[in-house]
Image (cartoon, rainbow, N blue to C red):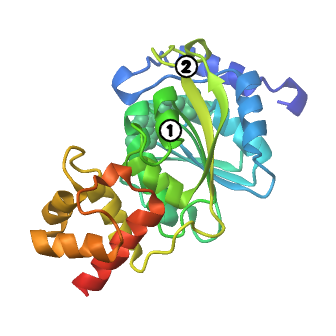
């Protein structure tokens, strides 16, 4: 078939979904984006460029995968549902720089899949794994340069939340440590097939060139972020005791050394204060 006769990715996907009698599974968050017009617009905003190596999580019917392959050097897509294999094979036939592997993205070794060198992530994910995926990507050693991701509007609000606000949470603090977030586009339910019950936002998070704080022990700092929000009604001292197995007096001394009020709740602290606490804890724990 000549290039000019080739049906669009959207048409190929619609035909393949129909031909293979594919039915979306609600429990896998299968709300597909099939409109090339919308996807092209989102990828323009994401500034996917010819040299990019892209990891796509959850390619679904593969329309976004095809458009990514037109713009980027290489696309590796990780899909959990093997039932999509006949659809994806057909949609991506003749797209040499796109490859699909069938794995759970939450369990996959993403660096091993992407090999050495920089890569970017693009994903329209099931919303129930948004937070886990964001934390996995943001905390990965030599993780992605940027993450462009469709999320439920409430999740976007959490990612963008200010320290101390109601939405400020471990995920928000972890993502803020990783990079600079912006909402590129609000996307209404009708854009998806089938439509979800919620508004969505396409976000872009660019990894910081220079991290906003430099903890003495990065692993401990990330653990502290989780501990600080573990039991929101408890003071940070109590959360420290529970998560790090230290006594009341030791917890008090750590907070004192960090210049933080001993009655404070973790959710009131910004990244700088969390980093001071993690450093004091690192010092104490040797
Ligand atoms: N990107 C496609 C699109 O925009 O049309 C599909 C989006 S759909 C919201 C989410 C996709 O992620 C589905 O194809 C689903 O099967 C897949 N998925 C769900 N859980 C996954 C996981 N743990 N790892 C990889 N893919 C997953």
**Mark 1, secondary structure of its residue:** loop
Q: CA–CA distance between discs 2 and 1?
A: 16 Å
Depicted 151 relative to depicted 70: above or below: above
Is residue 273 visible to the viewer in this orientation of the structure? yes
Occupied quadrant, residue 263: bottom left
Who is closer to the viewer here, 272 or 137? 272
The residue at which mark 1 appears reads as 58
Ligand 1 within 8 angstroms of badge 2 C-beta: no
Residue at 31%, 64% (x, y): give it: 224
Who is closer to the viewer here, 160 or 84? 160
Say which mark, if any, is on residue 17: 2
Ligand 1 within 8 angstroms of badge 1 C-beta: yes
Depicted 62 relative to depicted 15: above or below: below
Asked if residue 222 lies left or right of residue 20, the reply is: left
**Mark 2, secondary structure of its residue:** helix
Please state the horizontal and vertical placement of residue 235, each as a whole percent of the image: 21, 53
Is residue 106 visible to the viewer in this orientation of the structure? no
Asked if residue 56 lies left or right of residue 103, the reply is: right
Please state the horizontal and vertical placement of residue 132, each as a whole percent of the image: 38, 46
Asked if residue 53 lies left or right of residue 107, the reply is: right
């Amino acid at each position: 078939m000549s290039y000019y006769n080739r049906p669009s990715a959207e048409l190929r996907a619609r035909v393949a979904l129909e031909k293979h009698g594919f039915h979306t599974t609600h429990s896998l968050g299968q709300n597909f984006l099939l409109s090339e017009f919308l996807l092209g617009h989102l990828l323009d905003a994401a500034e996917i460029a010819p040299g990019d190596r892209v990891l796509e999580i959850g390619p679904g019917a593969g329309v976004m995968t095809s458009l990514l392959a037109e713009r980027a050097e290489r696309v590796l897509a990780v899909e959990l549902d093997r039932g999509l294999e006949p659809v994806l094979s057909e949609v991506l036939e003749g797209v040499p720089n796109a490859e699909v592997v069938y794995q759970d993205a939450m369990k996959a070794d993403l660096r091993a899949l992407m090999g050495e060198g920089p890569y970017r992530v693009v994903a329209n994910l099931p919303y129930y794994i948004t937070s886990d995926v964001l934390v996995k990507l943001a905390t990965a050693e030599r993780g992605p340069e940027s993450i462009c991701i469709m999320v439920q509007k409430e999740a976007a609000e959490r990612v963008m939340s200010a320290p101390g606000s109601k939405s400020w949470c471990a995920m928000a603090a972890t993502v803020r440590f990783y990079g600079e977030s912006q909402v590129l586009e609000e996307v209404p339910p009708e854009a998806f097939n089938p439509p979800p019950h919620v508004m969505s936002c396409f976000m872009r998070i660019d990894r910081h060139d220079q991290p906003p704080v430099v903890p003495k022990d990065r692993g401990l700092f990330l653990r502290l972020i989780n501990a600080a929000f573990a039991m929101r009604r408890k003071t940070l001292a109590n959360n420290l005791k529970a998560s790090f197995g230290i006594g009341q007096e030791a917890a008090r001394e750590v907070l004192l050394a960090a210049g933080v009020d001993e009655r404070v709740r973790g959710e009131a602290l910004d990244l700088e204060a969390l980093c001071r606490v993690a450093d004091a804890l690192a010092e104490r724990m040797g």
